[in-house]
Image: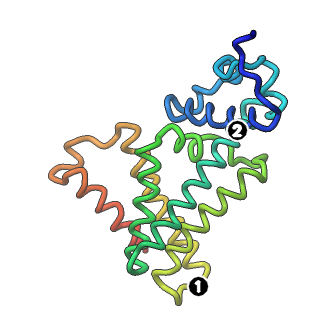
Amino acid sequence: MDSKRAYHHGDLRPALIAAAMAAVERGGPEAVSLRELAEQLGVSRAAPYRHFADRRALLAAVAALGFVDLAAAYARAQADAPDPRAALRETARAYLALAFGRPGLFRLMFDSDLLGPDAPVSLLRPAGEAWAGLRRAVAAIDPDATPRDVARRTISGWSTLHGFIALVQGGRLKGFMTEPLSESELVEAIIDKTLRPD
């Protein structure tokens, strides 16, 4: 009998997404190859194209799951926090945990062009839900803030976090820049700035 696994129509798609997620987390978006995934899963090279038009479509499905996970992490952080400031602090920690704990997935979600003008609704929806989770935490700090103020504070706080992540992951923060701060003190300083973006 052929050693290739006989995937049914309904279970090859999730298997491809799971295998692509694992590849992204090992080596970033560039590590995903439909041909290699088909070989890994023991299906024909044509089989993945019955579920995804191309590699980009598969990567969008992986990124969508990443945003679902991020939105859930935000919700947990906010539900478990004793007050709005603690909720925002833990929301920021959840974002940093994604960036430093799953850097390949983080790059796919935030440093690729998947969220460009032609982004599929299947990706925009979970990305929007994750953004709403962050915005909700910012809004809770000041219930009297206008929508404009909340938007401004959310963008500036997120930019602080994202800029810090980019500097760390790009190897741009050198010891002479951060001394005498410890790594944990530096992270706390960034989170403090996120809490006070004005």
Residue identifier under label 2? 14
Measure the C-alpha gap from mark 2 to mark 1.
42 Å
Position in image of residue 68 (x %, y %): 61, 55
Task: Say what amino acid the circle numbered 2 marks.
Answer: Pro
Name the secondary structure under disc 2: helix
The residue drawn where x is 70% and y is 42% is 60
Residue nearest the observer in this picture, 41 or 174: 41
Position in image of residue 137 (x %, y %): 50, 73
Quadrant (top left/top right/bottom left/bottom right) for the C terminus:
bottom left
Task: Say what amino acid the circle numbered 1 marks.
Answer: Thr
Residue identifier under label 1? 146
Corner quadrant of residue 37: top right
Eye-nearest disc, 2 or 1: 2
Position in image of residue 23 (x %, y %): 56, 29
Q: Is residue 80 placed above or below 166 in the rendered structure? A: below
Q: Is residue 144 placed above or below 99 in the rendered structure? A: below
The residue drawn where x is 35% and y is 40% is 172
Corner quadrant of residue 93: bottom left
Residue nearest the observer in this picture, 172 or 77: 77
> Which comes sooner in the sequence, label 2 or label 1?
2
